[in-house]
Amino acid sequence: MTLDTTKTALIIIDMQNESQFGIHGVDNIVDSTSKLIAECRKHNIPIIYTRQINRLDAVGLSKQEPLNQDDEPVFYHSGTDAIDIIDAIQPESHDIVIDKYRWSGFYQTDLDLILRSMGIKHIILGGVVTDGCVMTSVFDAYFRDYQVNLVKDICGATNEGAHMSSILTMANWIYNLAIFNSSEMIKKLSGQTYTFWESTYPDQLQFTPENLRDVFARLDQETQPSQQGAD
C-alpha cells in the first residue's frame, strides 16, 4: 500500500472533553491517539482536529438536539469546557482546528479547502463517535476522492456493537478504505513491517447480530501481506 507522507494528513474527530464521558474504552483511545499523533509529528504530517460545537443560544442546532431546562444544548455546549480538546492530546500552535456544527467534519466547514490547499491525497482518521461523526466524515472524505486510512482503535462509540457495526459498514462500502490499528500505522510510518486490512470488493464482510464479533475479528485476521517501508 502506497502512502506518500508528504500528501497525508491526520484528522482527529471530536476528541473533546465531552467525549470522555460515556465512550467505551476512552482511556485506551486517548492513549493510542497520543502515540499516533507523536509519530505523525516526526514525519511532519499535518495534524487536524475537529470540534463539535453547539451554540449556547441554540442557534443552528440539529433538529431535536437535546436541550436542558434553560433551552441550552445538553452536549458540546459552547459556553462550557466540554468543547475543548482533551488535555492529553492538545493541539500545538501550528496544528489546525476545525469547528463544525454538524456531524461530518466536511459539512459546511473549511476542511476540504484546507486539505486541497496542502495537496493532501491520503487521510489518516480516527475519533469519536464511530457511528456518528467519524462515519459521516469518512464517507464525505471518500465522496471527495481522498484515500482514507481508518485507525480503528482510536475510534470509539458508546458501546461495542455500535463501534463494530459502523466500522464494518465503512469497510463494506468505502472501496478505497484501509483499516489499521494504531500500532500498525506507527510501524508503517516508521518504515517497519506492518499489517492492515484493505477493501477488495463491496460487501465482503457481511454481518448479522449473531456473527458481529466474528466478522469484526476478520479485520485483524484477514490482513494484507506485511510490507516494508512507509512508501
Image (spheres, rainbow, N blue to C red):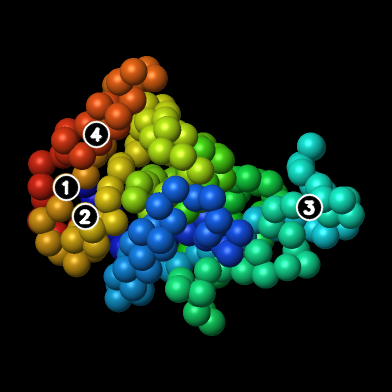
Q: Earlier in the sequence, mark 4 or mark 2?
A: 2
Q: Tell me the residue that label 2 is attached to.
A: 184
The 10 Å Cα crowd at callout 3, few under 14, some 14 to 19, many 20 or more, is: many
Q: Earlier in the sequence, mark 1 or mark 4?
A: 1
Q: Is the Cβ of the residue at disc 3 closer than 8 Å to that at disc 4?
A: no
Amino acid under disc 1: Thr
Left or right of residue 77: residue 206: left
Give the quadrant of residue 173: top left
Q: Where does the image place residue 207, in percent across and percent down from the top left?
A: 34, 20
Position of 75 relative to 118 (above/below): above
Q: Earlier in the sequence, mark 3 or mark 2?
A: 3
Q: CA distance from mark 3 to mark 4?
A: 37 Å
Amino acid under disc 2: Glu
Which secondary structure lies at badge 1? loop
Q: Tell me the residue that label 4 is attached to.
A: 217
- Residue placed at 68% from the left, 46% from the top? 102
- Residue placed at 46% from the left, 71% from the top? 89
Q: CA distance from mark 1 to mark 4?
A: 14 Å
Would residue 140 be seen by someone viewing this image from the given angle? Answer: no
Q: Where does the image place residue 147, in percent across and percent down from the top left?
A: 38, 45
Q: Tell me the residue that label 3 is attached to.
A: 73
Circle on res. 195? 1
Amino acid under disc 3: Pro
Foreground residue among 64 and 133: 64
Circle on res. 136? none
Q: CA distance from mark 4 to mark 2?
A: 16 Å
Give the quadrant of residue 222: top left
Amino acid under disc 4: Ala
Q: CA distance from mark 1 to mark 2?
A: 6 Å
Position of 148 relative to 29 (above/below): above
Foreground residue among 74 and 202: 74
- Residue placed at 78% from the left, 67% from the top? 79
